[in-house]
Amino acid sequence: MKLVVSSPPHWHEKLTVSKIHYNFILALLPAVIYAIFTYGMPAVRVMTLAVATAVIADILIRLAFRKPVTATDGSAFLIGLLFALILPPSVPYWFVIIGSFLCITIGKEIFGGLGSNPLNPVLVGWAILHISWPGYLNFNLAVANYNLDFPLHYPLTMLKNGGSELISGFNFLDLLLGKQVGGMGAAAVLLILIGGIYLLLRKIISWEIPFFFAVGVVVMSAVFWLSNSAVYANPLFHLLTGNVMIGMFFLATDYASSPFNKWGMIVFGLGIGVLTVILRTLSVYPDGVIFAILIMNLFTPLLDRIKNNPKPLAINHIERR
Amino acid sequence: MNSLLLKSKEMKITEVPEPKEVLLPLKGFDEEKEKLKIKEGSRVKTGEELIPGVYSTVTGTITGIDIMSFAGTDLTILRIAVSETDEIAPEITAAADYLEKDAAELLKKLNRANLGFDEELKDIKTVIISAVDTEPLAASYQQFLIENPDTVTEGLKLIKHLTAAGKVFLALPEPLLSSAANLTAGAADIFPVKPVYPNGLPEILTRDISRKYDTGKTAFLKIEKLVAAVLALRDGKPFSHKVITAAGKGKIKNLKVRIGTPLKDLLQDMQPGENEKVMIGGPMMGTACYNTDLPVTADVDMIYVQDAAEIVKNENNQCMNCGKCVEVCPAHLSVNLIGRYAEFSIFEQCRDLGIQHCIECGLCAYYCPSGRSLVQFIQLAKSELEKIEAEKIETEGEDVE
Ligand code: SF4
Ligand code: SF4
């Protein structure tokens, strides 16, 4: 009789890499449905194109690097989908393809693939496009041909141009319910929040990064708002607009580019929140979330050096060993 | 990963029939020196000293010596054919008034009765007696507490007498709290524990108790050994039987077995099939065996047969840096980094990250979504570091010369 021998532990929780990615995708599903209902076929077009490009690029590059093809683990699918959800629905097809391709190649695989990317791959692709062809990422132009039941102005551009007077027209319930212009899925704030809470409950992401991200946003925007409420928006407005919600739960929490120990996560989250508001208020860009996350990604190796103090677990036995 | 809670009658400790043959590992066996004493055909009594520090757990006739492989080492095993009648070695005596005797003398007697208590542990301040099973599925300690309440009470008095420890804690699973309230008779404090892995591990119990109380130097003892000590001193019975949980094939039961019984005698109704796994120990820390000829030794608390379908195949993918291992590690180690350094043979970095504090509880690998064999990496790094240390000492010694 042949017995199997292997090292302990002999049980496993059975939450595998692919299950984690599929759970992320599941958590994004409500936002995907929102995008389809709000923007129709153009949204479907961008999402399928982004996902397909990402998966094909992942397969091709792994073949080229002579590494095992891991497209079924859902990682490339998730990157493509997240990339689509922060885009406006009107972007041309070549724009999506180039962006999605850059996410996978420069964002992820070039550094060694899953778990080794220093920056969030989705944001790398986005940032390159944003700098190369800024015109296509204009949310106001994107909805020009639509007839939707909410104000067709990107709230953050309004804030940038006109201060808090112009944004007094937005009501918070509408913003929460996704009745706002923005990334095709990112604007569905409540649905993203529900997805995020699902991930928290499944223990797929830990609460530190989203929570302290929110704290950072609220504290920093409160500082500005209290100093001059005629120019600066209040904290709730900041929380409910742009990429804050999707960034909180889906972008900042990318495993490889965020710290792995608690204190690192806390500083990381706070940093993103604070930087987001600073960039929104003081830079030329309406939304600062993505650059804030990329900047804090660069600090991750440093934050990981915050020592996880090993705790000796000592024991004496009464029996001799 | 809740540990099993016993309620049903099936968990009652049942005695298994005497084995035909008993196998005893001879620790520190030196063939040249011991040849004369251990001869084929010579008769031994229960409790008789075989080689220094190793006692027979059965009455019978020596039939030979074998080498068996377990957990990467070779064990020298003595085979004894079991006799019909059980005779106890004359050196082991009963004494009803044992509590009045001197502690040093009692410790000697315990050692003689195969209990191997450490006589050096004089300066301990606190003793923890544990009735909390260590592994998930295991339920032998808790059942032991339920079935031997009076002896436990007596044992708690004994342990105070033996060690002069200021405090004694009886750790038990929370659900047993109400039924055990009067058990300690003032001789110990009860420390209830949530019956969830890894709370029953000695290191974790020690840490949890020291967080709540001022403990000082602490020593640990399983409840079974406490009861065995009373039986040895009071009734003159050497430590020859062990209670273990046997789980597998949909069954789970507590068995009282003679120490040295081969596993195959205990697995009659849970025979492992082709390509299944048999473990000495439980699902989290157990050691898989190459065959079922190995004996139950004094340290074994559990044996576990795992069906082929349940066997975890480690894929050992690249680490995705999710941080789950770091989150669950009770020793607060950066396990992801340790795993990577060990994988690429950079062992000094593992040491700097505190790898020696790992208690090999297996939680990191249990949760790792990439299925990395983290415990195996850690064991490898630890043994390599030991080799490096040994070499260092050697070369330093040369320098001095
Ligand atoms: S086995 Fe893993 S979780 Fe357990 S102490 Fe060691 S490193 Fe930590
Ligand atoms: S649990 Fe596994 S995949 Fe996650 S960080 Fe630890 S070693 Fe890497």
Image (cartoon, coloured by chain):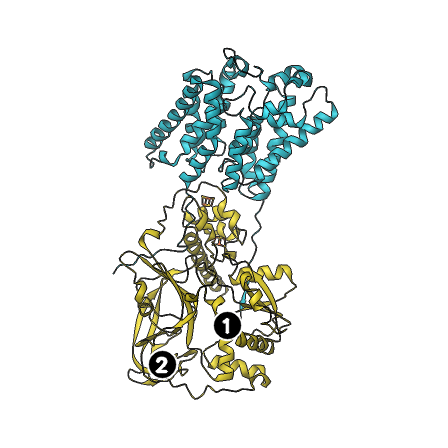
Chain colours: A cyan, B yellow
Can residue B344 be seen from the camera position used here?
Answer: no
Chain under callout 1 = A
Nearer to us in this view, A157 or A270:
A157
Q: Which residue is mark 2?
A: B34
At a point 60% along the width and 78% down the height, the residue shown is B161
Q: Nearer the viewer, residue B58 or B227?
A: B227
Looking at the rendered structure, the secondary structure element under dot 1 is loop
In the figure, residue B279 lies in which quadrant? bottom left
Please, is residue B312 above or below residue A213 in the view? below
Q: Nearer the viewer, mark 2 or mark 1?
A: 1
Label drawn at residue A319: 1
Q: Amino acid at mark 2?
A: Glu
Q: Residue A53, image x and y in percent? A: 38, 24
Q: Are marks 2 and 1 in contact (CB under 8 Å)?
A: no
Q: Residue at x 47, y 15 (%)?
A: A90
Q: Quadrant of residue B206?
A: bottom right
* Left or right: A151, with B139 as reference point: right
Is the residue B134 above or below the residue A140 in the image?
below
Residue displayed at 40% across by 21% down = A97
Q: Position of residue A95 (x, y in %)?
A: 44, 18
Instruction: Specify the amino acid type for callout 1.
Output: Glu
Label 2 is found on which chain of the structure? B
Identify the image quadrant of the N terminus of chain A.
Answer: bottom left
Q: Is residue B278 left or right of residue A99?
A: left
Whether residue A55 is visible to the viewer of this picture, yes or no, is: yes
**Is disc 2 placed on a helix, strand or loop?**
helix
Up the image or down, A143 lies above or below B181; here it is above
In the displayed structure, does residue A215 sit left or right of residue B326? right
